Amino acid sequence: MEAKNFFKIIDELCEEKNIQQSILSFGWIRELKKENIIRNIIRYTFDLNTAAFFNIAGDKYATYEVLKKNGVPTIEHLMVFNPKTRSNYIDKEIFEKISKAFEKYEHKVVIKANDSSRRKRCIFL
């Protein structure tokens, strides 16, 4: 969603629900106030969850594991660590697991950074 549309919806909801709105930090923060309760929107992030849940939601693999443990249908994830920077976390069978994943999904996989939205389609040779 474009920022313009997102904030248009917020503006309309505030007007409809009689919520006072202040725009702070050059538009980066919106403070919403109703009946002495104040909430903030920071960019597109609402302050409704704890810092822990915010961090889980920003981590693809952590989100996958929490959803899976709680019986929520998910797309399978496989965590692959960089051996140069995370050698203590390297799974000795990771290359075998990667090969099986590529075979299982007919080489149609998406590899993404755990904390980013950029993606690359990869072919395993």
Image: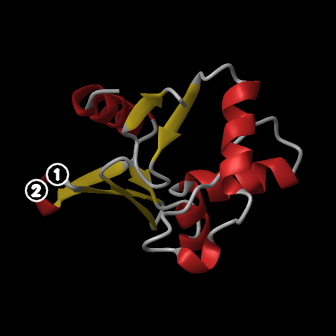
43 above or below 16? Answer: below
Q: Which residue is drawn at 67% across and 19% down?
A: 106
Q: Where residue 4 appears, x then y in whole percent? A: 22, 29
Look at the numbered disc 1 and give the secondary structure of its residue: helix
Neighbourhood count class around disc 2 (C-alpha, 10 Å): few under 14, some 14–19, many 20 upward:
few
Q: Residue at x 53, y 30 (%)?
A: 125
Query: In the picture provided, is 3 more to the left or to the right than 108?
Result: left
Q: Which residue lies furthest to the bottom in this view?
A: 88
Look at the numbered disc 2 and give the secondary structure of its residue: helix
At label 2, the amino acid type is Phe
Q: Residue furthest front?
A: 125
Q: Which residue is drawn at 65% across and 59% down?
A: 62
Query: In the picture provided, is 29 more to the left or to the right than 122?
Result: left
Q: In which quarter of the image is residue 74?
A: top right
7 above or below 51? Answer: above
Q: Where residue 9 appears, x then y in whole percent? A: 36, 29
Q: Where residue 47 appears, x then y in whole percent? A: 47, 62
Residue 26 is labelled as: 2
Q: Residue at x 40, y 41 (%)?
A: 117
The residue that mark 1 highlights is 27
Q: Nearer the viewer, residue 43 or 19?
A: 43
Please say whether residue 64 is visible from this viewpoint: yes
Q: Which of 63 and 114 is in front in this view?
A: 114
Query: In the picture provided, is 45 more to the left or to the right than 104?
Result: left
Q: How many marks?
A: 2
Q: Residue furthest right?
A: 71
Q: Which of 9 and 16 is in front in this view?
A: 9
At label 1, the amino acid type is Gly
Q: In which quarter of the image is residue 65?
A: bottom right
Q: Where residue 79 appears, x then y in whole percent? A: 63, 54
3 above or below 42? Answer: above
Distance between mark 1 and mark 2 Cα atoms: 4 Å
